[in-house]
Amino acid sequence: MKYLANLKPVNEYAWFGTWADTTATVNNTTYTKAITTSTCGYDLYREYLVKRQYRFFKADVGIADNTEDAVAAEVQVLDEKGEVLQRATVQPGEATPFEVPIDDVLRLRLVVKEWGCGSRIVVWGDPRIER
């Protein structure tokens, strides 16, 4: 198992704000290897080279408890062809589990869809790839 917070992304885009490898809390659960980003400005993404060497991507995804703008956000996991492997609308006060098969994925892309500017923070709670 490898945490994405311990891997260097091969590509990322965040119009306003930044992607961060940090500690974050969703619904009173603290994730020490979280990845966070804002939700302002186009579709935001971070991409990792996984080289078809892993079977699953797993994470709990939600809105940070300390966010000022507690509204929903759409998140997606895509492969290098742009195929959506899993999507969800994440809500404040709950974490949505992701368990995505990635047997044949070369590049894994985490996406936060643009829903207008706000101060909400999307948390990918302890995202990891597993063999």
Image (cartoon, helix red, strand yellow):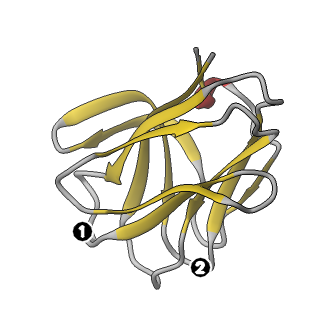
Q: Between residues 107 and 52, which one lies in front from this camera angle?
A: 52
Residue at figure coordinates x 82%, y 43% from the top left: 10
Q: Amino acid at mark 1?
A: Ala
Residue 124: horizontal and vertical position, in percent?
A: 45, 44
The residue to which callout 1 is attached is 70
Q: Secondary structure at mark 2?
A: loop
Which badge, 2 or 1, is on the more N-terminal residue?
2
Q: Between residues 6 and 77, which one lies in front from this camera angle?
A: 77
Q: Quadrant of the N terminus?
A: top right
Q: Amino acid at mark 2?
A: Gly
Left or right of 101 on screen, residue 66: left
Residue 34: horizontal and vertical position, in percent?
A: 46, 35
Residue at figure coordinates x 57%, y 64% from the top left: 17
Q: Secondary structure at mark 1?
A: loop
Q: Residues within 10 Å of mark 2 (few under 14, many from 20)?
A: some
Which disc is residue 97 wearing? none
Residue 45, quarter of the rendered image: bottom right
Which disc is residue 41 wearing? 2
Instruction: In the rendered view, tell whether residue 65 sits above or below residue 72.
Output: above
Residue at figure coordinates x 46%, y 85% from the top left: 116
Instruction: In the rendered view, tell whether residue 128 sits above or below residue 100.
Output: above
Q: Quadrant of the C terminus?
A: top right
Left or right of 76 on screen, residue 131: right
Q: CA distance from mark 2 to mark 1?
A: 17 Å
